[in-house]
Amino acid sequence: MKRSVEDHAARFSEKAAEYDDSKSDEYHACADLVVDYADPGPDDVVADLGAGTGAIALALAPDAKYVLARDISEGMMEEARRKASEARITNVEFAYGEFRDPNLNGSDRPSVDVVTSNFALHHLADDEKREAIRVMADTGARRIVLGDVMFFEEPDPDEPFYSPEVDDPATVGTLVEAFTSVGFAVVAVERIHDQVGVIVAERIGSGDEVSGAE
């Protein structure tokens, strides 16, 4: 990670109010695919990590039993809570959580069935990403859906999807290897842009089919 957790949290809290209006078409396409592939059922609990202003968590809430939304930025979570209140969505919990310590444990916490994350993991270095994906797998989830900045081709720092001074995206191959090393099979890779994509991973032996995005 090129900046501390505290630095990232402060940076995103400052931009929380205008964050939704600042995102690219590729970001929105990525978010839509994450929602489509997550595909929770009415008894499923979703953990949305790096939840930001709640784009994924709030979209999944009507179909899921419960959503545990975690982020490091209190400003982003306040914006998400405001949106949830306006939409009268009550089955989402917004709380502090980091990728490598997502604050999902506790006797009163439901077990996790699906993990999602969109445009957040690229702030971590590759070894930190591997640790984060191991933590995702340790939740017991059968499915992990990751939308993010990722390199399908050679990195181009002139592209608008990441800032080299603060971000550290991985290659698609690095991410796929991280999933397979913790007992998941990568069942779909969607390329939205040379530097933006969605990876869908299923726990080997889970027996579930992934519904494809139309």
Image (tube, rainbow, N blue to C red):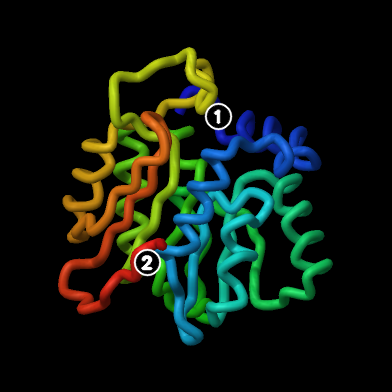
**Is 170 situated above or below 91?**
above
The residue located at (71%, 47%) in the rendering is: 76
**Is 37 situated above or below 149?**
below
Q: Which residue is mark 1?
A: 4
Rendered-image quadrant of the N terminus = top left
Where residue 142 appears, as percent x and y from the top left, is: 31, 71
* Near-viewer residue (167 or 139): 167
The residue located at (51%, 47%) in the rendering is: 29
Q: Which residue is mark 2?
A: 139
The residue located at (23%, 67%) in the rendering is: 203
Residue type, label 1: Ser
Q: Secondary structure at mark 1?
A: loop
* Label 2 environment density (alpha carbons within 10 Å; few <14, some 14–19, many ≥20): some
* Label 1 environment density (alpha carbons within 10 Å; few <14, some 14–19, many ≥20): few
Where is residue 145, by image quadrant?
bottom left
Where residue 152 appears, as percent x and y from the top left, is: 30, 31
**Is 8 situated above or below 113?**
above
CA gap, disc 1 and disc 2: 25 Å
Q: Residue furthest front?
A: 214
Mark closest to the chain's N terminus, 1 or 2: 1
Viewed as shown, does residue 208 lie left or right of 105?
left
The residue located at (63%, 55%) in the rendering is: 55
Rendered-image quadrant of the C terminus = bottom left
Q: Secondary structure at mark 2?
A: loop
Viewed as shown, does residue 8 lie left or right of 157?
right
Residue type, label 2: Thr
Circles 1 and 2, Cβ within 8 Å, touching? The answer is no
Where residue 204 appears, as percent x and y from the top left, is: 17, 68
Where residue 83 appears, as percent x and y from the top left, is: 77, 60
